[in-house]
Image (cartoon, helix red, strand yellow):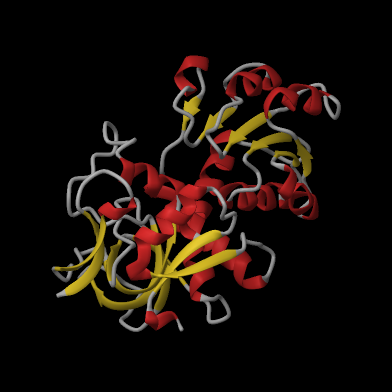
Amino acid sequence: MSNAVVMTGYGPPEVLSWSPVTLPEPGPDQIRIRVHAAGVGPTDLAIRAGHLAPVFPSPPGTILGFEAAGTVDAVGSAVSGTAVGDQVAAFLPGLGGYAEHALASFWTAKPAGVSWADAAALPSSAEAAVRVLRELGVTRGETLLLLGGGGSVGLIATQLAVAQGVVVLSAVGDRDRELVTSLGATPVRYGAALLDDVHARTPGVDAVFDAAGRGGLADAVKLAGGPARVITLADPTAGDVGVRLSDADPAHATAALELAMARLAEGSLRLRGQRLIPLDQAAEAHRLLETGDIHDRVILTSALSE
């Protein structure tokens, strides 16, 4: 047996319960990791509340968590290059990170110099950032508008785009203006001021990456001269303005993790600050995030991460 944070149904954070579960066994192409740390993202909260039930059904017993880092303690029969005892960070598109043990199909090695918390904070955001930049096809000298540039995905996307020679305009709140400037982007304002603020710097943009999903797509389409090179991760109004809603791309997930982890290890990639909360207190982590008072990335940690 093992333990995990399971959903007892849809609802408030109290539906998350620390409970015994059957120890999962890896399939041929999977590994099982003993989780040291797991990332908590906004989609986790939306799934738990039932907001995504029509497209992401999550029955009682669901274990949330799109990303985790830990030590490999079992490998599938077809796995090569990874062995029991290896330290890894894993992207979990099928969930399962809020647990003592998690199964993974997409992972990368965790270098010794990368903390467990950083390793757990990387996979989901890195996969999304690398994926959407690839889908947009931004190239050196082009101008990219990033909505939500101060979030976990936005910060990674900003740094990767700037490193490629892309000019980045980052729509952020006041508290993140200095941060995105330090990463090589130009901050612009959300809301009614977005069009004027962008036009004060450039007549238009070549592409728009919406990493926030909180509005602004109509203005983004105007700025990009149409929806062809506008992509959102989460805005439910995307179809109304002809914008593509991007989803996880398993075929490229491992390569995205390897790219981001290498940059993190060499010190050329910066992540958000973190708040560490014990794994069995995931309900409290969700409560804190829903207050809107925490701007740090929340990471659930086990005693193994100490």
Q: Is residue 239 above or below residue 178?
A: above
Picture residue at 56% right of the left edge, 75% below the top:
114
Picture residue at 53% right of the left edge, 54% below the top:
126
Picture residue at 33% right of the left edge, 62% below the top:
97
Residue 32 appears left or right of 175? left
Q: Nearer the viewer, residue 225 or 98?
A: 98
Residue 169 appears left or right of 124? right
State the image quarter where residue 200 is shown.
top right
Residue 178 appears left or right of 82? right
- Label count reads 0
Image location (x, y in percent) of residue 210: 58, 35
Quadrant placement of the N terminus:
bottom left
Q: Can you name the residue that lies furthest to the right here? A: 200
Image location (x, y in percent) of residue 206: 70, 28
Image location (x, y in percent) of residue 43: 41, 45
Image location (x, y in percent) of residue 137: 61, 36
